[in-house]
Image: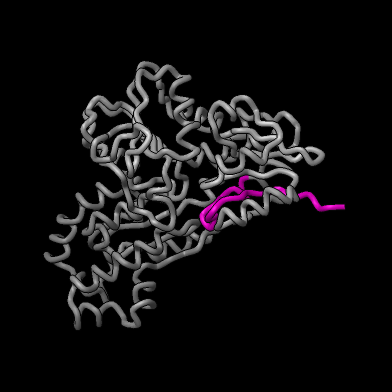
Amino acid sequence: MQQPLYGLIGGKLGHSYSKIIHEQIADYTYDLLPLPTEAEARVFMEKRAFTAINVTIPYKQFVIPYCDVVDPKAKAIGAVNTIVNRDGKLYGYNTDYAGFSYLAKAHGVDFADKTVLILGTGGTHSTVAAVCRDGGAREVLTASRTGRDGALLYSEAMHRRDVQIIINTTPCGMYPNVGQCLIDPKAFPRLEAVLDVVYNPFRTELLLRAEDCGVTAAGGFEMLVAQAVFAAEHFTGSTLDTDTLIPTISRRLRHQLANVSLIGMPGCGKSTVGAALAKRLDKRFVDLDAEIERRTGHNIPDIFAEEGEEAFRRYEAEVLAEVAKGNSQVIACGGGVVKNPANSRALRQNGPVLWVRRPLSRLATRGRPLSKGGEALRQMEAERTPLYTAAATAELENN
């Protein structure tokens, strides 16, 4: 008898959280099944050797002809993300619709009488557009790289100053290519909310820019959990308590996966606090200065002495950009990390940033190239305090 097979198919799945989500929802083993080419996807679908699967980029439309029965909602949308094999017949559903609806509702985003701009034209675009139309949107615009099939070019979309809600349905900004952004939210004076279906990182560059504009900004993690819960109902044939399950699993997994980053003056105790915090939270501890030394093969005082601060800041930014892509870490940063705004954004993408504060008289200065004490230290604190304030999610008094 064939073993039950549950899982996710898609082009690239190295970034996926679906396995850990599904295995918290129900009692089955869930596998990631990358299919890099359409030829491989075709063979997989023709064999039908699975119990139930989810489908992600780029196969949400590709799989439809293989389904014997397509749910009316999925058929209307033109995208399938959930397939159940019942006695050799394939049944296709779309749980992204309910998942995206949940995300919007959870963050108070109302589409009624609004002008909405959707970025991208793939299978998820169709789902999101359906939710917007069903929610009473006044106008649903689409922007793409090519501008085909009636879509605006991204450069053209930037001139639609009446846009009130922006939704990204493309992989832009998704791990590992973080930091990318298709448009600038500042171009839209009436903007109220930005939603991004990308869930890794938690905050894409688009969302970070939206937060800078003071508008509602939410990533796709809650949508991912919600659609997984709704898919599990199809997988198991049972009704789940979705109102409780979705927020509970979302909260638990965000706590598990989030980074916690520590910033503050040199010698304020970031490494000591960070190591203890990592142990308490069962996360990996990363001392950024130690990581820079490991990757460059030189200790930091020598880098300052031989190459200068500018070279060190370049190494710091490069190492941080890579480290911050990861998850489940406590990251203790050097005191001057906030001098580069890109560093603060990198830290914010995957979790909270804590500013460790300690009285100047109690700061350790030994062996620190830029921290010699006295008036110089007071001046450094005055210069950096606004930068720490801007970067921090919360403050931690280490006294």
- x and y percentages locating residue 87 in the rendered image: 82, 39
Q: Which residues are magenta?
A: 1-21
Q: Is residue 12 magenta?
A: yes
Residue pictured at 45% horizontal, 44% vertical: 198
Q: Is residue 280 visible?
A: no
**Left or right for 94, reference 307:** right
Quick one: 65 or 154, which is closer to the camera?
A: 65
- x and y percentages locating residue 385 in the rendered image: 21, 52
Quick one: 290 or 56, which is closer to the camera?
A: 56
- x and y percentages locating residue 347 in the rendered image: 35, 54
Residue pictured at 40% horizontal, 68% vertical: 287
Quick one: 141 or 323, which is closer to the camera?
A: 141
- x and y percentages locating residue 193 in the rendered image: 34, 30
Residue pictured at 55% horizontal, 40% vertical: 61
Quadrant of the snapshot with the C terminus: bottom left
Q: Is residue 33 above or below residue 25?
A: below
Q: Is residue 67 magenta?
A: no
Residue pictured at 50% horizontal, 56% vertical: 328
Q: Is residue 367 visible?
A: yes
Quick one: 364 or 247, which is closer to the camera?
A: 247
